[in-house]
Image (cartoon, grey):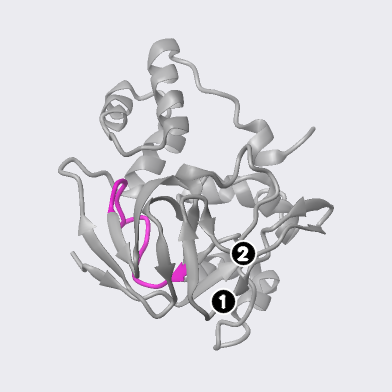
Amino acid sequence: MQSKHYLMTIYCGKVAERYGMETAIDKHPVKTNLYLSFEGLAGDECADKLYHGGFERALHQYPSEHYTYWQEKYGAIYSEQRAEKTHEKIAGMGENLSSTGMTEHNVCLGDRYQWGEAIIEVSQPRSPCFKLNKRWGIKSLSVDMQEVSRCGWLYRVIQPGIVSVNEPLELMARVDNAMTINAVCETYFGDPLNKEKLLRLSQQSTLSDSWMDRVLQRLATNEVESWDFRLLGPA
């Protein structure tokens, strides 16, 4: 288990009217030191605070490797992200942290990292939404991303502090019964009414409250909440 990971880029963005919506999905590289609060990076914004941001969704990390997959799947539409080797292009998935070597298969729910002065903890996978479809002009992107579990993941901030792209993420702790982000996605999205898997997921004490509520609701009702609005947007 690798304990130290250096980031490629830190991204922040401002809310703007783009792609027919208010969004901060287009984030730009930041090379200076930044203050990371419980709410996220200084200077970073989100348009819809009901579904984005907040204590348990303060940061979004997305593996850079996934862009190769999407480019191969969708062709030249992703070339704008990968055209320059300097990684100066905007973040295409709304991510704050870009990395290589960290993926949904080796990052676990509850992993706690020291990052500069701050401490952050993995809280849940990212839930793909229709804003990705609008940003890229691909109406099935959110559905495709969910199906292959290339979603990235979110962090809560345990200890605020100054951070920078030059400071590595150093793994401090991993819970005993840790599930990888991929395993969480495969249960939550791929097998959403499998009682045995849901029970295991319900034992993950570091899972975000919103996801835990839905897991417990599924166990109680044997029904899955509708994903239509999140994935496809307003009818």
Q: Is residue 61 visible?
A: no
Look at the picture and state if 2 lies above or below 16: below
Judged by its main secondary structure, the magenta piece is: loop
Of the image marks 2 and 1, the number of the one nearer the N terminus: 1
Look at the picture and state if 25 lies above or below 56: below
Start-end of magenta stretch: 98-111
Give residue 137's quadrant in the image. bottom right
> Residue 190 has which mark?
none
Percent x, y of residue 87? 56, 82
Percent x, y of residue 97? 48, 66
> Residue 43 has which mark?
2
- Name the kind of residue labelled 2 in the image: Gly
104 sits to left or right of 224: left
Residues packed near mark 2 inside 10 Å, few (<14), some (14 to 19) or many (20 plus): few
Contact (Cβ within 8 Å) of mark 2 with mark 1: yes
Could you tell me how many numbered marks the image carries?
2
| Camera-side mark, 2 or 1 | 2
**Residue lying at 32% horizontally and 56% vertically, measured from the top left:** 105
* Mark 2: secondary structure: loop
104 sits to left or right of 79: left
Give 167 or 224, whichever is nearer the viewer. Answer: 167
Q: Distance between the Cα atoms at labels 2 and 1?
A: 10 Å
The residue identified by callout 1 is: 30
Give 134 or 61, whichever is nearer the viewer. Answer: 61
**Residue lying at 63% horizontally and 78% vertically, measured from the top left:** 89
- Name the kind of residue labelled 1 in the image: Val
Give residue 78's quadrant in the image. bottom right
Q: In which quadrant of the rendered image does the C terminus lie?
A: top right
Percent x, y of residue 56? 45, 43
